[in-house]
């Protein structure tokens, strides 16, 4: 049993470190200082990700699953799988010019806003500390991710109680635990704990505790641990796969 628990923990930890919903988003609002009105050419624009402030080895964000720079004619939103230390915009406009910004510092928060001033031949990017963006909970990809996580974990819990012949009350405990832990792990804990795997560990311990406390007369502690690990493996592995396929359509 201990070996099984250890293997499950390692698999789940890898999945948690690979991705953690919701994905960081960066909103770019454009302010034009040009004589003629311009429009963004989305297919020729990208966000360059950098590890240092000199951006000596910058890599285009590209299009990988949900990760992409989504642009309309007047604004852009970048969705990423992980936080970027630094970034640089390369935007092509309707006048045929490709303008680049200087290197700007990325913000380690789920949703960050920047103003982009479009000049004659360059871009100036400024972080907005008091952003007026839509609440994070109203983001389509966030709602989708929360719904997918809840559904998968409930189904995994149902499968667990059927195979292990455990009480149905466990499923209700999993639901209650997730309704509390998901908002905490996605929107509150990351403010104080930047490491996603640590947030995952705290959320896992919380969910195991809730399942055990609400079912302590009918199950053992290792049963609660098994429930927590099984549901997490299901939600992170299947959730990542579904999000990779469907989330780009929800931006």
Image (cartoon, rainbow, N blue to C red):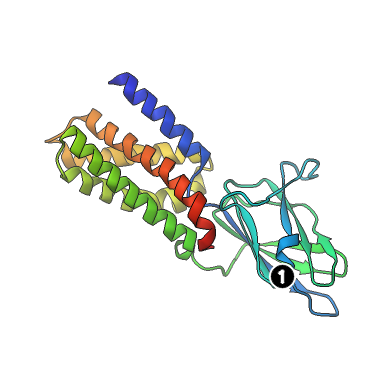
Answer whether residue 189 is visible to the viewer in this image. Answer: no
Indicate the position of residue 74 as horizontal and vertical percent values.
69, 72
State the residue lying farthest toward the front: 245
Residue occupying the point 22% across, 46% down: 171
- Nearest the viewer among 241 and 182 is 241
How many numbered circles does the render carry? Answer: 1
Of 121 and 161, the residue lying toward us:
161
Relative horizontal placement of residue 71, taking residue 88 as reference (left or right): left
Question: The N terminus appears in which quarter of the rendering?
Answer: top left
Q: Nearer the viewer, residue 22 or 128?
A: 22
Measuring from the top left, give residue 35's x and y in whole percent. Answer: 86, 79
Where 19 sits versus 106, above or below?
above
**Coordinates of residue 218 in the picture (x, y in percent):** 12, 35
Identity of the residue furthest to the right in this view: 121
**Residue identified by numbered label 1:** 30
Q: In this view, does 228 lie to the left or right of 245?
A: left
Q: Is residue 35 above or below residue 200?
A: below
Going by the image, does 215 lie left or right of 39?
Answer: left
When asked about the image quadrant of residue 38, the answer is bottom right
| 223 lies above or below 35 | above
In the image: residue 211, left or right of residue 43: left
The answer to whether residue 20 is seen in the rendering is: yes
Element under disc 1: strand
Residue 49 percent location from the top left of the image: 71, 48
Q: In which quarter of the image is residue 164?
A: top left
**Where does the C terminus fall, quadrant-wise?**
bottom right
Residue at left 24%, top 28%? 222
The residue sitting at 16% across, 44% down in the picture is: 168
36 w.r.t. 215: above or below: below
């Amino acid at each position: 049993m201990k070996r099984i628990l250890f293997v499950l923990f390692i698999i789940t930890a890898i999945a948690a470190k690979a991705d953690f919903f919701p994905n960081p988003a960066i909103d770019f609002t454009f302010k034009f200082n040009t004589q003629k009105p311009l429009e963004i050419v989305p297919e020729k624009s990208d966000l360059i990700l950098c590890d240092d402030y000199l951006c000596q080895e910058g890599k285009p964000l590209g299009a990988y699953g949900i990760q992409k720079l989504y642009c309309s004619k007047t604004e852009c939103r970048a969705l990423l799988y992980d936080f970027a230390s630094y970034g640089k915009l390369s935007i092509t406009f309707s006048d045929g010019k490709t303008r680049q910004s200087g290197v700007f510092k990325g913000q380690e928060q789920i949703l960050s806003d920047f103003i982009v001033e479009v000049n004659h031949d360059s871009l100036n990017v400024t972080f907005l500390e008091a952003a007026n963006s839509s609440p994070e909970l109203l983001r389509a990809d966030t709602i989708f991710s929360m719904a997918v996580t809840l559904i998968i974990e409930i189904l995994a819990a149902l499968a667990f109680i059927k195979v292990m012949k455990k009480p149905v009350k466990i499923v209700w405990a999993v639901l209650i635990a997730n309704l509390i832990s998901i908002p905490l792990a996605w929107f509150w804990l990351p403010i104080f704990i930047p490491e996603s795997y640590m947030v995952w560990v705290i959320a896992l311990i919380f969910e195991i505790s809730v399942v055990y406390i609400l079912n302590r007369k009918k199950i053992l502690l290792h049963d609660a641990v098994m429930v927590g690990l099984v549901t997490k493996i299901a939600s992170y592995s299947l959730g990542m796969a579904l999000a990779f396929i469907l989330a780009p359509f929800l931006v």
